[in-house]
């Protein structure tokens, strides 16, 4: 019921505003005995951190996470793990220019309508800053899944489109993803993306993006029909990331144009390499690794669209809290393409959904 | 935690298999004093019912819903409302041909991997038959919302694409939707769709679809950041409908190609007709009526993709429970385009999400 | 959030009114593959059934339970198990005498204040008739626990006090419990109880009771601190049974008068019979098998007080829905000591709490 | 599902161990616009604070609470309120003497059995130190209820028994409660209690207690049958407090000995002072303000038993993690009667249950 809690068996709740003293999360339900240190989480946070390249916000936040509870002698104890990140660069700037204005595309108007008041400093609770705690929680989820699913388990994301510019999916190279500031898996697209984003940035405009997350090494059987389907929970978790407007599983919208007989993933038995066993092999993955809301054992493929950052330097028409017409320009240190920093967040949310479903699966079928 | 429960303050749980004796739902949290009769729900069920046209399954199910509790002297009492629909046409046919086979595209394999056994009769719990109870629950959700939001409140859906054939959105006419078996809002598309689906049906193939649901008359303020955002919950609810593979809010994927300054919905004050008041008007609706996870007061626009029905007459490669290669043809009375009958289901799920969020909003902010 | 749902991983929701067409429950989260038939549940229902002796209500209800879903070829499938019991003896009697009156001690007034209307036929939803579904759900919980905990697992209850008359705890004999209509473990008390209750019944009065439930063969480790402690969940589950006004774990109130050094349960290692192993033995069980909200492996001991049945033949002062003073006599077929029929309900609730905690434990620590 | 989360619409989750760096809570679902400052919470925390008299632990903890989020310009914003209290006096002492021992009466053994490891420093998560966050959350609950229920609303507790020594209930004086270190409402009992506890303390023993909490000014209608009854949720919340072994509502166990006709609370209409209105008056309060799981509008009366502090100076038999017999003496700074400091905790839990039910009631019936 709590709007700020994610998950059931693997559960975390976050708190904090963009320009408050700190942000935090409490992660509950973590199995005991898992080795966990702050460095395990910091690695993922560094991926999301602002200031990493000229294509993301220049806010200077070290995003150093501290673990305040739930870990003893280097291992999880089964009790809640409290995480905190201090807000270092929450400049005590003057907000009087936007205090009473509703920035279009932002949550200013809706928070004000819902709550009757709002913390206008940098977006308050609606700021994407909150997603740092998702990344940290995702780091814990990964530790659980890596322990139980083994070495083949992996969740990784890539950006496949910036503004109107798509990658060539045939050139997909996971190794390339870490070598450029866009998490782009197609090295031939990087140059054009750089030029495009430079232009966008200089014009004070912003660009949307498409991101794809793959989870590999996930066993068949995760997901609980019919109102806790794995794809439904993934869709909810991803759509809940700031600025996301669309989610696909597997072929997504493209599957609608395929004849039924081609849209299925046929199956065959195959020999397991090096063993005297056979296992099921799917001959394609239109389904994105999920059938009937339950994982098939194939790669789980989730794709989502991120809208262009709503803060732009072009004057926009709006209204204020007094019911008057107004104009707003959103200055500040913002991301020209907020999709870039959403990649580790998308990965984290996929990991968290999987961890939750894994523990839930163990409850009923373990 | 329960996989078969939807919602929090407005909550329903469903039960039943495709070929069991009946299916049912229990709807809890309904405000007391709302006039409710079986006919209120039957109207929506009739829209989803099989056998309605040659484009949907010929299974003969009257889908007559009965209310077993929670209504007294014609009004809801605030206690749980039990709904039941008998399965009339659950032919005691011979399932020996598919009993041990995993039909590709169906949930056969995943249920078997998750649970170690499965009810193979007509898809069991994974059958779209379960969605009848969603439609019934949605009927109750509509009654709540109509009472509280007034006459302008409406949730309605339309099909905008079958297979590769899209409508022309400029010809959108809501009045046309009820006049054709496809819930098509563009009368000029109906003829081509009929021919296309006839062809698909004769070939024993199937087609995908895109459906769009609009909710009008919803006040600003619904949705609870950050893990119970209205768009997140809509995405989860829609992705959980059988065969859905993608969900968009507002512009969805298309918003990624628009510059930031054009992707926002600007605001102006306007005079309220016939009153000495002014109100906020959005000049566009790229956001689909939701910002920061909270409704803006504009139309809420949700779009989703339905994959082609997985039952086709073309032989498909598969394996069986004994770990052997096999071939399967899915005979039976199936929908050539399951997207058609998903329209009332999509409407119902949107209504249920809104009812849940409305009650939750009242708890905190009412 | 739903008021009519119990539990998390093992979950059931009930519906139905005393004099509606039927009552029912949906049990979700049940592990797959457990043999289950209606007879497994009927045995427990027969224990609670009205009309069993002259000391309980003479309403004639066979309480025949039917399973409508979730069981296939004799085994649970992991999907929700719908249970239904038709109300057979819901006489279409004239309720005009109590329609507008609030019977003291009953929930008439509070339902009316909460909901603004009420189903006045036989207590509606507030009737103890609802507890039949708890007993049925408890039957499923027992099947899960018996499978996983083994032969030593057992939940059984006994009545230790009727009105002012206590048993002698030193004469406790579990075998005696099934041999008298009071579930009394002390055969020397039965005669006096019979005479006392005969008198109470003839005078149109009623008597309270104390009931004690023991769960044996429960492993250490169940319970999830700090807001899902096993004792807290047991207390909530038991206090939620109709007419219960007090709950104790272990020594309960009596422990307050014992010095701290005597109130603890000391431990020693002992040899396991027939094995070359040692195990922990507690030297007493003041704690009732729970420490820090987690089971110790000892017997779990829960005790509760049931108030006298509120329906009595003595005229009582009350008011009516029109705000006028009035007098009420509650005729009808009621239990002179509702505590008797609460025994199988108490057992069932303990079993359900244990099943839920067992599955939750598996999720995190399994 | 999360063991460390309390409530639904009004919800808080706590974290932290006795001797970790800090303890904390996140309170979610709080209505926006409520004036809230740290001082509002500190007042209640000071009541629970260690070191307040010689009858409670001498651990020196200022228990200064800080609000890290969810309050802006002095008002709640509707977003989660993060609370933190630093552990100041968590001496880095040597725990080697109890590291491997299970202290009888403590949760050492059960945590170890559940999780396979434990934070042995001062009880870790099982320490009553966690209850400080309940008190803080209760302070927020009180603010909500005071705003909505008005001046007559009040939750207050008193101790009615220490060890074997009861108060005389006829001498109950709420004004006396704040004037002695025992929250004793009967001034004639204070002297004897002081002497008794001095003796207990000097002997290194400990004493149990009975505490009674009254909530006044609560409107009729709170509580959601049948698995979220107000009394059930109160029982669960109170039984979940450290060392509590029994809970009663209203007459509790005593009601079992009363004839049915006397156990009810009769009703009459009475004139409302100073208004031309009449209202319902109950002529007694055996029910403790709750019927059918719903508040009646009378005072809600909850009573509970606290076992003697488990830490005593008498050597006790136990076993260690290596499966060997051992003896333990629990030195340290402990409460001779942990019941004393439980009074503000009991009050807080009652306030939290009421706040949760109030918001839930508004969702369905508001």
Image (cartoon, coloured by chain):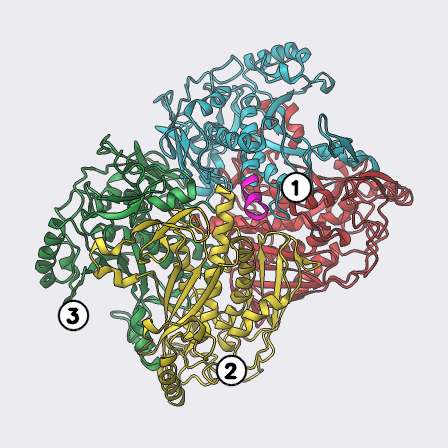
Chain colours: A red, B cyan, C green, D yellow
User: How many marks on residues?
Assistant: 3
Q: In 3D space, how far apart are the residues under numbered discs 1 and 3 (Cα atoms)?
A: 64 Å
* Residue B246 included in the magenta stretch of the image: no
In terms of secondary structure, where does tag 3 sit?
Answer: helix
In terms of secondary structure, where does tag 1 sit?
Answer: strand
Check residue C170 in the rendering and tell me which mark sits there, or answer none: 3
Callouts 1 and 3 on one subunit = no
**Subunit of label 3:** C
* Residue B365 included in the magenta stretch of the image: yes
The residue identified by callout 1 is: B294
Q: Residues within 10 Å of mark 3 (few under 14, many from 20)?
A: few
Residue span colored magenta: B358-366
Residue D344 drawn above or below residue A171: below
**Subunit of label 2:** D
Residue A237 drawn above or below residue B330: below
In terms of secondary structure, where does tag 2 sit?
Answer: loop
Residue sitting nearer the eye, B317 or D192: D192
Q: Nearer the viewer, mark 1 or mark 3?
A: 1
Residues under numbered marks 1 and 2 in contact, where contact means CB atoms less than 8 Å apart: no
Residue A209 is situated, as x and y percent measured from the top left of the image, at 77, 40
The residue identified by callout 2 is: D95
Answer with the quarter of the image where residue B232 lies: top right
Residue C341 is situated, as x and y percent measured from the top left of the image, at 22, 50
Using the rendered image of the protein, determine whether residue A324 is visible from the camera's viewpoint: yes
Using the rendered image of the protein, determine whether residue D242 is visible from the camera's viewpoint: no
Residue C308 is situated, as x and y percent measured from the top left of the image, at 23, 54
Residue sitting nearer the eye, B195 or C208: C208
Q: In 3D space, how far apart are the residues under numbered discs 1 and 2 (Cα atoms)?
A: 51 Å
Q: Nearer the viewer, mark 3 or mark 2?
A: 3
- Residue at horizontal 54 percent and vertical 15 percent from the top: B55
Q: Residues within 10 Å of mark 1 (few under 14, many from 20)?
A: many
């Amino acid at each position: 019921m709590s709007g700020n809690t994610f998950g059931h068996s693997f559960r975390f709740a976050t708190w904090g505003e963009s320009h408050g003293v700190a942000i935090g999360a409490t992660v509950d339900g973590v199995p005991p005995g898992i080795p966990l240190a702050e460095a395990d989480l910091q690695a993922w946070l560094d991926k999301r951190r602002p200031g990493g390249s000229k294509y993301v916000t220049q806010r200077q936040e070290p995003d150093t996470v501290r673990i305040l509870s739930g870990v003893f002698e280097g291992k999880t104890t089964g009790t809640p793990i409290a995480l905190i990140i201090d807000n270092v660069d929450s400049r005590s700037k003057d907000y009087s220019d936007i205090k009473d204005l509703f920035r279009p595309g932002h949550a200013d108007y809706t928070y004000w309508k819902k709550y009757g008041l709002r913390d206008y400093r940098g977006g308050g609770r609606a700021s994407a800053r909150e997603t740092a705690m998702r990344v940290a929680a995702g780091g814990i989820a990964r530790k659980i899944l890596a322990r139980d699913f083994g070495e083949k388990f992996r969740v990784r994301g890539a950006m496949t489109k910036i503004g109107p510019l798509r990658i060539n999916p045939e050139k997909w190279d996971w190794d390339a993803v870490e070598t450029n500031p866009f998490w782009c898996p197609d090295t031939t697209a990087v140059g054009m993306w750089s030029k495009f984003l430079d232009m966008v940035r200089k014009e004070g405009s912003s660009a949307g993006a498409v991101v794809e997350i793959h989870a590999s090494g996930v066993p068949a059987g995760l997901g609980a029909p019919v109102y806790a389907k794995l794809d439904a929970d993934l869709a909810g978790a991803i759509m809940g990331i700031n600025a996301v407007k669309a989610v696909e599983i597997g072929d997504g919208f493209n599957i609608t144009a395929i004849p039924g007989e081609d849209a299925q993933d046929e199956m065959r038995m195959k020999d397991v390499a090096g063993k005297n066993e056979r296992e099921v092999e799917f001959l394609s993955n239109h389904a994105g690794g999920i059938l009937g809301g339950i994982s098939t054992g194939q790669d789980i493929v989730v794709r989502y669209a991120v809208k262009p950052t709503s803060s732009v330097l072009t004057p926009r028409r709006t209204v204020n809290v007094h019911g008057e017409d107004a104009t707003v320009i959103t200055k500040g240190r913002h991301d020209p393409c907020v999709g870039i920093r959403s990649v580790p967040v998308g990965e984290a949310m996929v990991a968290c959904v999987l961890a939750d479903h894994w523990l839930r699966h163990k409850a009923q079928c373990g």
